[in-house]
Amino acid sequence: MFAVYAAEANPEQPLEALRVGERPDPELPRGWVAVSVRAASLNMHDLWTLRGVGIKADQFPMVLGCDGAGELADGTPVVVHGVVGDASVYGDETLDPRRTLLTEKYQGTFADTVVVPERNVLPKPEELSFSEAACMGTAWLTAYRMLFTKSGLRPGQTMLVQGASGGVSTALVALGRAAGMRVWVTGRSEEKRALAARLGAHETFESGERLPERVDAVFETVGKATWGHSMRSVRPGGTIVVSGSTSGPDPSADLQRLFFTQIRVVGSMMGTRDELADLLDFCRLSGIRPQIGTELPMTDAPSGFAQMLAGETAGKIVFTR
Ligand SMILES: NC(=O)c1ccc[n+]([C@@H]2O[C@H](COP(=O)([O-])OP(=O)(O)OC[C@H]3O[C@@H](n4cnc5c(N)ncnc54)[C@H](OP(=O)(O)O)[C@@H]3O)[C@@H](O)[C@H]2O)c1
């Protein structure tokens, strides 16, 4: 079958490990289903995989793509849930110590067909296109869990999103605005800040700019480049929710400020099947849709990867079949 895959790990030049070509058709284990992929979206996770982060060397070649939407053999339109874990034991599959995301152990969605356990597909709401639905399983699910499960924010409170144009950040802005939060965003360029404002941010700031007042919660996916600002921007007793560190981890965690102002730092990882179902309903009911900055045929995937690597995002990058 056609697939976009990582041939090997290349920590320094990740795009050199990227291949567009043929991979064997997948086998269908008992209790799993085959999804004929219609659209899938690019996540930073795919660049990490090309770099060899979060994947063992013997797992290559690996078809990339952590989320997607498509059709089952009988034509039923579905959204793929990318976390494979045991919810029956842990209640929350993200807490299963053996949980794995698509592309870590099992082949991903940038292909004609992806196979996943039966519980890892959910009905696609009619109101969402395949491309929109393809954004839900990773970036949007992560944003949903950060905001609604982890932050403890109530409508009317103020949230700061670090980064304006990324997949997770644009999802946080749209979800926060729709849920009645006051949404503040930092962005690295005028253009990116303008995008955040269009998506519903009440105010935007340059990266690192001093805010008019401290916020109730900060949403972090950037890491070292913004961590100090996040620590300075949260009110005493407030919360920083962290789901990524694109610019690397910050070795100086500013522990003194952390305990002195009693900041809560909360980690967040993808989301559960139930959260994905609620997210799909929230999009349907509120009318919000993912911001798709680039849509390309999957055969042109390398140019989408190059865009993300260069930081030239304007929302999600989606590949279609
Ligand atoms: N834990 C999880 O479950 C989970 C799930 C999804 C993603 N993640 C992580 O979250 C991060 C973002 O993923 P994504 O798919 O949303 O990536 P993306 O679409 O490429 O977005 C990258 C974001 O990071 C910001 N950024 C990058 N470098 C920066 C810097 N030096 N200074 C300030 N801002 C910077 C960008 O801000 P501008 O708009 O200002 O350029 C942009 O908003 C990745 O590290 C990813 O691994 C984690």
Image: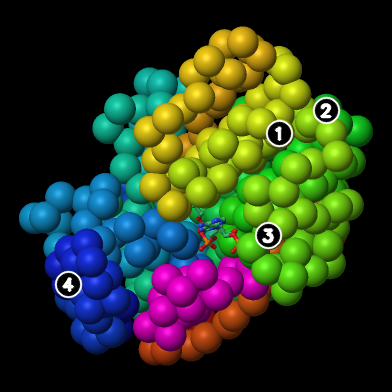
Disc number placed over residue 7 in the picture, else none: 4
Q: Secondary structure at mark 1?
A: helix
User: Which label sits on residue 46?
Assistant: none
Q: Please provide percent x and percent y for residue 143.
A: 62, 45
Q: Which residue occupies 17% across, 72% down?
A: 7
- Where's residue 121, x and y in %? 49, 53
Helix, strand or loop under label 2: loop
Q: Residue 34, relative to residue 54: is it above or below?
A: below
Q: Which residue is mark 1?
A: 233
- Sequence-earlier tag: 2 or 4: 4
Label located before the other in sequence (1 or 2): 2
Please indicate, yes or no, whether residue 75 appears anywhere in the rendered image: no
Q: Which residues are magenta?
A: 302-319
| Residue 154 numbered tag | 2
User: Residue at coordinates 79% horizontally, 47% vertically from top-left?
Assistant: 184
> How many angstroms separate mark 4 from mark 3 (CA)?
34 Å
Along the horizontal axis of the image, is 239 left or right of 311? Answer: right
Q: Are marks 2 and 3 in contact (CB under 8 Å)?
A: no
User: Nearer the N terminus, badge 1 or badge 3?
Assistant: 3
How far apart are the alpha carbons under marks 1 and 4?
Answer: 42 Å
Nearer to us: label 2 or label 3: 3
The residue carrying mark 3 is 187
| Camera-side mark, 4 or 3 | 3
Which of the two residues, 298 or 253, is positioned nearer the viewer here?
Answer: 253
Ligand 1 neighbours mark 3 (CB distance < 8 Å) = yes
- Disc 4 marks a residue whose amino acid type is Ala
Taking the spot 71% from the left edge, 57% from the top edge, the residue there is 206
Look at the numbered discs 1 and 2 and tell me whether their residues touch, using CB distance below 8 Å.
no
**Residue 288 versus residue 147 in the image, above or below:** below
Q: Earlier in the sequence, mark 1 or mark 4?
A: 4
